[in-house]
Amino acid sequence: MAAYGKKASAKVARAMHEKKKGTLRSGKSGKKVTSRKQAIAIGLSEARRSGAKVPRKRASH
């Protein structure tokens, strides 16, 4: 069974397209996102908020 839903991959894809265009911005600061990893994280975060099937975040130490 898939760990991520279709809605989640759509959100990540949209975030990646925005990053490539240079229009993806992060959080409160509104700085331009240049990192691929950060773009994916933003997409997954948005998917999580919209109720898509996304696994829980791993606990950081």
Image: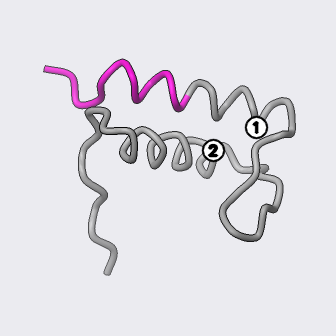
Looking at the rendering, which quadrant does residue 4 occupy? top left
Give percent across and percent down for residue 11. 51, 30
- How crowded is the residue under tag 1: few (<14 C-alpha within 10 Å), some, or many (20+)? many
Which residue appears farthest toward the right when viewing the image? 22
Q: Residue at point 78% right, 62% down?
A: 30
User: Is the C-beta separation of discs 2 and 1 under 8 Å?
Assistant: yes
Residue to which mark 2 is pinned = 39
Give percent across and percent down for residue 20. 80, 31
Q: Residue at point 45% right, 42% down?
A: 44
Query: The N terminus appears in which quarter of the rendering?
Result: top left
Left-right relation of 35 to 13: right
Name the element at disc 2. helix
The CA span between labels 2 and 1 is 7 Å
Left-right relation of 56 to 45: left
Q: Amino acid at mark 1?
A: Lys
- How crowded is the residue under tag 2: few (<14 C-alpha within 10 Å), some, or many (20+)? many
Magenta stretch: residue 2 in it? yes
Q: Residue at point 62% right, 26% down?
A: 14
Q: Earlier in the sequence, mark 2 or mark 1?
A: 1
Give percent across and percent down for residue 57. 30, 57
Magenta residues (range)? 1-12
Q: Residue 19's mark?
A: 1
In this view, 1 is above or below 49: above
